[in-house]
Image: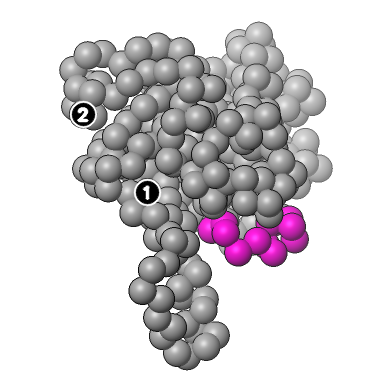
C-alpha cells in the first residue's frame, strides 16, 4: 500500500496510521511536492493526502489508476476535483469537525480586533509611544446588543453564533434550511432571513460558506451596498467569496465601517490595495495555524482513510 503526503509532515504525527504502508513525502521540512514530482509518484499510489494549496485535479487523478482515496487535511475540498474523483470510484474525505473550534475562535478574534480597534490601537501606540486620549470616539463599536448576521449556518457558522451570543449579540442568519427550534432558541431565538434582509439588518456580517462556483463573488458591490455604513464584514471562509475590488472600494469610500479577513482572493499574496487600508484587519489564513489543530485535522482525515480502506463509509467521506 502506497500513501503520498503532498507536504512534508513530521512522521510522529501520522506513524500510527501508516503501519505496513510505503510513505512518500517531500524530503525538505515545510515543503510541498511539485506537480512534476507528483506525476512520477501517482501511477501506483493507493492513498493521497493533500493540504489546501495542493490541487488534485483531473489531470493528476487520471495518472493514478490504483488510487482508492484522497483525503484533505482541512474542511474545504475546493482543491480537489471531487466530482471527477467520485466518477473514477475514488473516495474523498476531509476534516469537517476538527476545524470548528479553531476557526470559530479565530472568527471571533478578528471580529473583535476590527470592531474594537485592537490592531489600530496597537499600531498607533507603537508608532507614537504616547497614549492619545479622545473622550468621545466613534471609530469603534462594542458587540454587546448588536446583531450578527451569519451567512451559512453550518457547523462553523453555528459555533461562531454561539460564541457571539455569549458576548450578548443578537443572531440572524441566511441558509438553505431553518435551524431546529431548540438550536435557534439556544442562540436567543435566531431568525432566518433572506441574504438581502440580513445584509441590511446586521451590524456585523460573517461568512461561513464553502467555495464553489455559486459562491464565487457572492459578496460583491451590489451586496455590499445593502450593508449599513456602520457595519463590518468578516471572512474566515474562502477569499474569492468576497469580490476584493468591491470590498476595497466600499472600505475606501466608507460605505461600510470596517472588515476583517483571514482569507484573501489572491492567496498567497495580499493585495497592496488591501494592505493600504486602515479600516481592515488581515491575518494569513491562520485559523488552524497551530500544531495541535493541524494534527487534529490530519488525524480526522486519516481516520476517514482508514475506514475507506476497511470497506466502510466514514462520516467525513463526501
The part of the image, by quadrant, that contains residue 149 is top left
Q: Is residue 246 above or below residue 79?
A: below
Q: Is residue 209 above or below residue 91?
A: below
Picture coordinates of residue 97, whole percent (x, y): 36, 32
Distance between mark 2 and mark 1 Cα atoms: 18 Å
Residue at x-position 42% and y-position 47%: 107
Disc 1 is placed on an element classified as helix
Judge left or right: residue 137 versus residue 200. left
- Judge by depth and name the residue closer to the eye, 294 or 176: 176
Q: Is residue 279 magenta?
A: yes
Q: Residues within 10 Å of mark 2 (few under 14, many from 20)?
A: some
Q: Is residue 88 magenta?
A: no
Instruction: State the extent of the magenta-drawn residues as a range.
Output: 270-282
| Residue hosting label 2 | 188
The part of the image, by quadrant, that contains residue 45 is top right
Quarter of the figure that contains the N terminus: top right
Disc 2 is placed on an element classified as loop
Q: Is residue 239 visible?
A: yes
Picture coordinates of residue 241, whole percent (x, y): 63, 33
Picture coordinates of residue 120, whole percent (x, y): 50, 69
Q: Is residue 305 visible?
A: no
Q: Residues within 10 Å of mark 1 (few under 14, many from 20)?
A: some
Picture coordinates of residue 294, whole percent (x, y): 43, 48
Q: Which mark is residue 108?
A: 1
Residue at x-position 44% and y-position 31%: 201
Amino acid at each position: 500500500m502506497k500513501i503520498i503526503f503532498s507536504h512534508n509532515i513530521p512522521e510522529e504525527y501520522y506513524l500510527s496510521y501508516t503501519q505496513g504502508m510505503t510513505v512518500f513525502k517531500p524530503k525538505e521540512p515545510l515543503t510541498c511536492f511539485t506537480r512534476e514530482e507528483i506525476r512520477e509518484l501517482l501511477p501506483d499510489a493507493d492513498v493521497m493526502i493533500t493540504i489546501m494549496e495542493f490541487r488534485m485535479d483531473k489531470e493528476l487523478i487520471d495518472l493514478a489508476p490504483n488510487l482508492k482515496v484522497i483525503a484533505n487535511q482541512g474542511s474545504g475540498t475546493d482543491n480537489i476535483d471531487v466530482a471527477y474523483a467520485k466518477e473514477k470510484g475514488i473516495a474523498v474525505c476531509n476534516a469537517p469537525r476538527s476545524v470548528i473550534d479553531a476557526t470559530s475562535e479565530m472568527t471571533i478574534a478578528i471580529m473583535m480586533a476590527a470592531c474594537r480597534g485592537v490592531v489600530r490601537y496597537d499600531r498607533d501606540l507603537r508608532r507614537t509611544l504616547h497614549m492619545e486620549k479622545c473622550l468621545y470616539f466613534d471609530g469603534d463599536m462594542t458587540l454587546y446588543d448588536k446583531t450578527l448576521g451569519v451567512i451559512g449556518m453550518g457547523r462553523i457558522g453555528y459555533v461562531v453564533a454561539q460564541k457571539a451570543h455569549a458576548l450578548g449579540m443578537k443572531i440572524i442568519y441566511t441558509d438553505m434550511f431553518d435551524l431546529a427550534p431548540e438550536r435557534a432558541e439556544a442562540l436567543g431565538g435566531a431568525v432566518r432571513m433572506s441574504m438581502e434582509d440580513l445584509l441590511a439588518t446586521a451590524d456585523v456580517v460573517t461568512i461561513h460558506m464553502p467555495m464553489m462556483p455559486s459562491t464565487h463573488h457572492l459578496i460583491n458591490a451590489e451586496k455590499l451596498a445593502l450593508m449599513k455604513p456602520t457595519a463590518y464584514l468578516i471572512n474566515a471562509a474562502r477569499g474569492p467569496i468576497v469580490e476584493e475590488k468591491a470590498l476595497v472600494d466600499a472600505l475606501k469610500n466608507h460605505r461600510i465601517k470596517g472588515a476583517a479577513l483571514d482569507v484573501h482572493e489572491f492567496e498567497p499574496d495580499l493585495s497592496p490595495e488591501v494592505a493600504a487600508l486602515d479600516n481592515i484587519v488581515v491575518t494569513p489564513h491562520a485559523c488552524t495555524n497551530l500544531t495541535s489543530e493541524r494534527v487534529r485535522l490530519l488525524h480526522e482525515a486519516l481516520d476517514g482513510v482508514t475506514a475507506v480502506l476497511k470497506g466502510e463509509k466514514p462520516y467525513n467521506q463526501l
